[in-house]
Image (cartoon, rainbow, N blue to C red):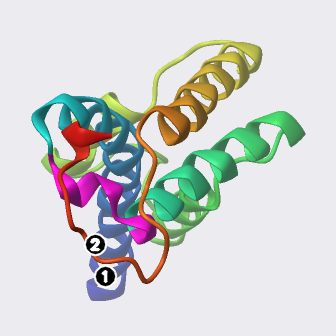
Amino acid sequence: MATDFLFLLAADGLLLSHVLFVAFVVLGLVLILVGKPLGWAWILNPWFRVAHIAAIGVVMLQSWVGVICPLTTWEMALRERAGSAVYSGSFMSHWLESILYYQAPPWVFTVCYTIFAAAVVASWFWVRPRRFGDTPTHDAAQD
């Protein structure tokens, strides 16, 4: 019984991590686009920008080859191990699941991820990140 609770807790933790990953990808682009006219120098940080473009790149490639996200697979495995029905459980998991998982044909997700990845790549050229090792000497609005 206590083991089941721990597996459910781990599944909820993975679900939260998944939602945070999605938020990083989506809000990252929004913050880059908003930060350019507002002169936010931190959006030029090359570590942030490389992590951001890599994150959406992985999502897009997974959708192209038809691979289910490992976070989803691990979460479902933990819920099954706990003896819980997949995607049912705590209040937190109910709401995070409703935000993250929605129904559409797989091709719709592939198209959406590809368009979003293209927007992230375009933002790379519109809001150029600093080079690694460069120190911020001006704001993003001056570019």
Above or below, 141 relative to 111 = below
Give amino acid for label 2. Answer: Leu
Image quarter where the C terminus lies is: top left
Q: Is residue 106 left or right of residue 83?
A: right
C-beta proximity under 8 Å, tags 2 and 1: yes
| Residue hosting label 1 | 6
Q: Which residue: 83% across, 35% down?
A: 64
Above or below, 98 relative to 43 = above
Residue 11 image offset from top left, x and y in percent: 39, 66
Residue 33 image offset from top left, x and y in percent: 30, 30
Q: Nearer the viewer, residue 139 or 30?
A: 139
Q: Which residue: 67% across, 53% down?
A: 58
Q: Nearer the viewer, residue 126 or 73?
A: 126
Q: Which residue: 31% across, 68% down?
A: 13
Q: Is residue 16 left or right of residue 85?
A: left
Above or below, 33 relative to 137 = above
Q: Magenta stretch? A: 40-47
Q: Residues within 10 Å of mark 1 (few under 14, many from 20)?
A: few
| Residue hosting label 2 | 9
Give amino acid for label 1. Answer: Leu
For residue 139, which numbered disc appears in the image? none
Residue 60 image offset from top left, x and y in percent: 70, 39
Q: Mark 2: which secondary structure?
A: helix
| Residue 42 among magenta residues | yes
